[in-house]
Amino acid sequence: MDIDVTKQYQENMEIVIDKMFHRCFKEKQFKQAIGIALEARRVDKVKEAIEMSGSEMEINLGYTLKLAQEILQSNDFRTEVIKLLFLII
């Protein structure tokens, strides 16, 4: 695949994913945003979704921990997410 095509594809995917985050945050669908963030390896968006969840913050912390333990394949990324959760608490 051509380097320019690959770069354009990645840029387009980032735009789509950012729109998904915007919609999730607007509609207060924080669990969905957390799932997307974990799949996209966007720790910044995991943090944002948890912090924006207000009264559901504790529930979303637990949800994120459960997902990190059960579905994340990368030990390094799992550790990064768990460290983030401890910083938020």
Image: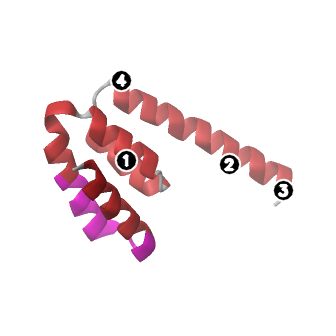
Distance Cα–Cα, label 1 vs label 4: 15 Å
Mark number displayed over residue 3: 3
Location of residue 70 with respect to 52 vertically, above or below = below
Q: Where is residue 80 in the image (x, y as percent from the top left)?
A: 40, 64
Mark number displayed over residue 10: 2
Q: Which amino acid does label 2 sit on?
A: Gln
Q: Where is residue 26 in the image (x, y as percent from the top left)?
A: 36, 23
Q: What residue type is labelled 3?
A: Ile
Instruction: Tell which tag, 3 or 1, sits nearer the viewer.
Output: 1
Q: Which secondary structure is most common in the magenta stretch?
A: helix
> Which residue is disc 1 drawn over?
46
Q: In this view, does 22 lie to the left or right of 86?
A: right
For marks 3 and 1 on the same chain, the one whose residue lies earlier in the sequence: 3
Distance Cα–Cα, label 4 vs label 2: 24 Å
Distance Cα–Cα, label 4 vs label 3: 35 Å
- Please tell me which residue is depicted at 19% across the width and 40% down the height of the picture: 57
Q: Magenta segment range?
A: 62-76
- Please tell me which residue is depicted at 33% across the width and 39% down the height of the picture: 49
For marks 1 and 4 on the same chain, the one whose residue lies earlier in the sequence: 4
For marks 1 and 2 on the same chain, the one whose residue lies earlier in the sequence: 2
Instruction: Tell which tag, 1 or 4, sits nearer the viewer.
Output: 1
Q: Is mark 2 on a helix, strand or loop?
A: helix
> Which residue is disc 4 drawn over?
26
